[in-house]
Image (cartoon, rainbow, N blue to C red):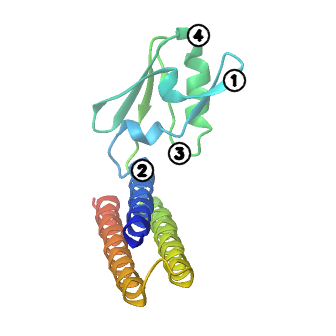
């Protein structure tokens, strides 16, 4: 029983770490990456669709993203969606593709991105602590219901705490790397 609880909490913690990494990939660090436009939604055919479902996103140069729409009639909508996405980008089009130059980051914007990264990391830590709480509650319930001995429960708590510490440390490491990437000139 305690192994099942441990595996479940381990999966929840891994998911939290993966979520933080996904959020970090959306933060731009001065270098063009297609993940930067992942959250952009385009008004197309009467509904909103993710940008990557209406065109191909590429990064031919370190400071340029290019969106190649599958339907040329969507160019204006794609340009509008990128402009209104709050990413601070100014796209332009030549009738065939939408070019999105990535401006150099100002010191103020870098500090703002670091704050956002720290916020995402804290959300990840909270998710990990919630997984730990759930696992500890399940272990206590197992002891109360007679499915676990006191020793098994204690070992389970220790194992879950070790996993929690390891997971939080991983998030801290990912955050430190992202901060360094953002602040690098």
N-terminal of the pair, mark 3 or mark 4, is 4
Q: In the rendered image, which residue does mark 3 sit on?
A: 87
Q: CA distance from mark 4 to mark 1?
A: 15 Å
N-terminal of the pair, mark 2 or mark 4, is 2
Mark 4 and mark 1 residues within 8 Å of each other at the beta carbon: no
Residue at figure coordinates x 44%, y 17% from the top left = 97
Q: Secondary structure at mark 1?
A: strand
Above or below — where is 76 with respect to 114? Answer: above
Q: In the rendered image, which residue does mark 2 sit on?
A: 22
Q: Which mark is residue 47?
A: 1
Q: Nearer the viewer, residue 47 or 111?
A: 47
User: Tag 4: Cα neighbours inside 10 Å, few (<14), some, or many (≥20)?
Assistant: few
The percent coordinates of residue 134 (x first, y second) are 53, 72
Q: Nearer the viewer, residue 157 or 43?
A: 157
N-terminal of the pair, mark 4 or mark 1, is 1
Q: Nearer the viewer, residue 38 or 17?
A: 17
Residue at figure coordinates x 35%, y 49% from the top left = 30
Above or below — where is 70 with respect to 122? Answer: above
Q: Is residue 46 left or right of residue 66?
A: right
Residue at figure coordinates x 56%, y 84% from the top left = 144
């Amino acid at each position: 029983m305690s192994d099942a609880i441990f595996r479940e909490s381990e999966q929840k913690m891994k998911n939290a770490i993966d979520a933080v990494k996904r959020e970090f990939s959306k933060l731009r660090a001065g270098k063009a990456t297609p993940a930067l436009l992942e959250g952009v939604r385009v008004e197309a055919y009467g509904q909103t669709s993710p940008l990557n479902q209406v065109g191909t996103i590429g990064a031919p140069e370190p400071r340029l993203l290019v969106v190649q729409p599958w339907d040329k009639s969507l160019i204006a909508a794609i340009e509008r969606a990128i402009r209104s996405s709050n990413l601070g980008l100014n796209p332009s089009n030549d009738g065939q593709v939408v070019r999105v130059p990535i401006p150099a980051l100002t010191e103020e914007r870098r500090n703002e991105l670091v704050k956002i990264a720290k916020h995402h990391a804290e959300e990840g830590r909270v998710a990990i602590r919630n997984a730990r709480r759930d696992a500890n509650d399940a272990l206590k319930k197992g002891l109360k219901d007679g499915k676990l001995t006191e020793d098994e429960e204690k070992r389970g708590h220790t194992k879950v705490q070790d996993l929690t510490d390891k997971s939080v440390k991983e998030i801290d490491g990912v955050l430190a790397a992202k901060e360094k990437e953002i602040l690098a000139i």
